[in-house]
Image (tube, grey):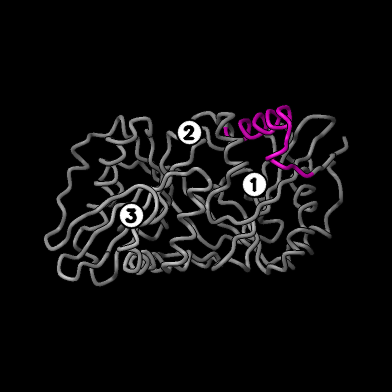
Amino acid sequence: MTLDIQPLNPSHASEQELADYHAMRAAAVSVDFPEDPPLTYEAAVGRLRTPPVGDGPCRFWVGSLDGRLAGSVRIALPEGSNSGIAQVEVHVHPELRRLGVGTALLRAAMPAVLESRRGTVLGQPMKPDSAGAPWVAGLGFEVTHSMVMQVLRIATTPARLWEVSVPAGYRLTQWTGATPEQLIDSYAVARQAIQDAPSGRTSYRETAWTPDSVRDADRELAAAGAEQRVVIAIDDTTEQVVGVHVVHNYPHRREIGYIHDTSVLAAHRGHGLGLAMKAAMTRLITDERPDMNLICTTTATTNTHMININHALGYCTAPTMNWVETTTTRLAEKLAALSTSPR
């Protein structure tokens, strides 16, 4: 069998190319994440065309075996705090694994990684027992961080869990869309507190939040057609933002809200602000978006405090996901040492 690898431009791909991509990705999801709902065409193509905010410029390649789409590879080049990282995401149809497809796709994308002059390659998060775990280990990737996924199924969770009082001395404010200018300075400071979250040994860094980076992120979200919902905690004494909870929702996955940040300034922790903000957000989503039936979040496995807060609100724990990375030089050497085509 001969693997034919070609670039893919999601904005100009044909309907057949997109249908083939969806079929490959849906088959992979059904095997790798059987606990998830089936991947729809809209979700697969939507993420292809609208990558998560913060991923930076992306390039795609697909590989076909005897006319059948066998797999894909994506290279993302985040900017700002992560301008030294290239993110790599490889997917292979379950029926065509162990044929060298993933390795060949990765090799085809390596020139773009090398041209970016980034010293670290970050792989996609994966389950510890996934089919790809031994493969990435053989390519020199190491586990640098572990996250637990948690999911709130709104329709089947008792609403009483979200009736949480706001701690004395604070009040909550909420909005959808861009950050109000009168709050943006202290909002950026409070959001920067996410830097305290456990991150293991990963080279990936959370966004360095400043008023300008907040405005940039707001514009990027709006351009992507994504909704941003925010609940903040304000200190009644200083009138400053001291806590932030942010949920993003993309048009191709309207049923899912993705928690982006939950942070509280160190001096204001221990009062229950995180619990109160998350509860208020769930009530907000229930009122405004009854079609959004899932809220998803990831938390460091060592962050038991936040994991327990989520459990108190009705979140169920889903699989643990490992972050893996290697140096660009090491990956290039490993790929050069392997055979150049699928068996």
Apparent side of residue 224 relative to residue 16 in the rendered image (left or right): left
- The reply to whether callout 2 and callout 1 are in contact (CB within 8 Å) is no
x, y percentage for residue 83? 61, 67
Residue 35, placed above or below residue 53: above
Mark nearer the viewer, 3 or 1: 3
The crowd level at tag 1 (other Cα within 10 Å; few <14, some 14-19, many 20+) is some
Residue 269 or 230: which is nearer the viewer? 230
User: Does label 2 or label 3 sit earlier along the sequence?
Assistant: 2
Looking at the image, tell me whether mark 2 or mark 1 is earlier in sequence order: 2
Residue nearest the observer in this picture, 28 or 184 = 184
Give left or right: position of 186 versus 342: left
Find the distance from the CA under tag 3 to the CA under tag 1: 33 Å
Tell me how far mark 2 sits from mark 1, CA to CA. 18 Å
Q: Amino acid at mark 1?
A: Gly
Instruction: Name the residue located 68 percent from the left edge and 40 percent from the top edge.
Output: 11
Q: Residue 46: x and y, percent?
A: 58, 37
In the rendered image, the quadrant that contains the C terminus is top right
Which secondary structure, mark 1?
helix
Residue 251 marker: none
Looking at the rendering, the stretch of residues picked out in magenta corresponds to 7-29
> Residue 105: x and y, percent?
77, 47
Under circle 3, the secondary element is: strand
- Report the predominant secondary structure element of the magenta stretch: helix
Q: For mark 3, what is the residue?
A: 245
Look at the image and tell me in which quarter the N terminus lies. top right
Instruction: Give the labeled residue for mark 1.
Output: 132
Give the residue at mark 2.
35
Q: Amino acid at mark 3?
A: His
Identified at 54% across, 64% down, the residue is: 204
Q: Residues within 10 Å of mark 2 (few under 14, many from 20)?
A: few
